[in-house]
Image (cartoon, helix red, strand yellow):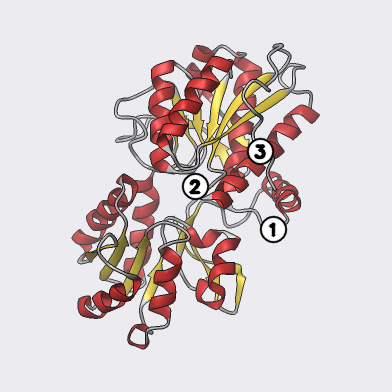
Amino acid sequence: MTTPPPPPGAERTDGSSVRIGALLPLTRPGWVEAGQHLLAGLELAVREVNDAGGIVGRPLELVVRDTAADPRRAAAAVDELARLGVAALAGEYHSVVARTAATRADALGLPFLCSSAVLDTLTEQPTQWVARLAPAQSHGWRIYADFLLGAGHSRIAVAADSSVYWASGARILRDRLAPRGGTVIELDMRALTPAAVCDALVDSRATALLLLVGHPEPAVSIVKSVRHDRRLTEITIGAPAGQPEFAEWATLLGDDSAAIPFLRYLPERLSPLGARVETALRERLAQAPSFVAFEGYDTIAVLADVLRSRGEDRARTAASWPHVAVEGTRGRIQFSRTPGINVWQWAWPPVQVVDRDPAQPDRFRILHAG
């Protein structure tokens, strides 16, 4: 359960709190469940910071804005939050939205710690203002491609929607697979129905189908069509973008939700801090927390550490990214310059390929780690 953002003008303006702006998809067409998990992690960490005395005695306050997966809303939110005097920005799940937010934050000189978006090109030019916790798409999706090859798949179909994010994913897979004898067959979901996808899979002789499409639709309909087509009983369905991570996936698909490998960013075993946070997040969410909730918590852990040591000056915050060394829920967080990445990057969070266990769909199996 999430609290809706306050109406314009309702934020505290007396200067008594240290404020962080949070960008989240909390309404459709955004991935609402991801936004709720991200917010739960952010809020839990803020509560713990305040219970421990805040930022040098001042309370930390989260100013939430719903992006609804809309880049224009995100840009307007960044402008508004900058005017409100937030010390930094946090959050965002959708890569295309985060790219717009990062570009705007860079132009305004507003520090932005991106929690969950993975698109390599968050900004077109190198910037000192933006850092990122999630692994770059090229890193995680190469690990996923290695998993496919290791599982014996060399003819891989991708059901792809039209967006920069999906096109980038398809290119990463193709570049990783081709030198190793793999072939990527693209199925354009602007032209195909879920039933037509089944026919194309039979014709292509693919052994795996990857869902490079939105959630819940058309991903859910594609899975149902493929799983109930007797010609395709041996095909593996995969979802590198992580659609099966959230409970809604299992609710919508039931038994069909299992055995669909996806990427998540958790270690095999959580540290004592991670285990404690997991318990608190489970209580807050009334369900098992996703890796996105841990990303939210770690975002605040980093920003609180920076604000305690550097104060609220935005330029000082941006200058601190290369000096961060914070124990997060999933490992020690430090930022560096990574080739091909224009923002300060945690290289790297733990990466797993997991799926839901067919014998118990609410349990995850680790298939591969990178």
**Front of the two marks 1 and 2:** 2
Q: Is residue 328 visible?
A: no
Residue 67, how many percent across, how many down? 50, 37
Residue 335, how many percent across, how many down? 47, 31
Up-down: is 17 above or below 197?
A: above
Residue under label 3: 4
Label placed on residue 69:
none
The answer to whether 135 appears left or right of 306 in the picture is left
Label placed on residue 30:
2
In three-dimensional space, the C-alpha distance between marks 1 and 3, rounded to whole angstroms, equals 20 Å
**Amino acid type of disc 3?**
Pro
Place residue 194 in its image quadrant.
bottom left
Residue 157, how many percent across, how many down? 28, 68
Residue under label 1: 287
Q: Mark 1 touching mark 3, by CB under 8 A?
A: no
In three-dimensional space, the C-alpha distance between marks 1 and 2, rounded to whole angstroms, equals 20 Å
The answer to whether 360 appears left or right of 129 in the picture is right
* Mark 1 / mark 2, whichever is N-terminal: 2
* Element marked by disc 2: loop
Up-down: is 356 above or below 199?
A: above
* Element marked by disc 3: loop
Q: Mark 1 touching mark 2, by CB under 8 A?
A: no
Up-down: is 313 above or below 2?
A: above
**Amino acid type of disc 2?**
Gly
Place residue 126 in its image quadrant.
top left
Looking at the image, the residue that sits furthest to the bottom is 230
**Amino acid type of disc 1?**
Gln
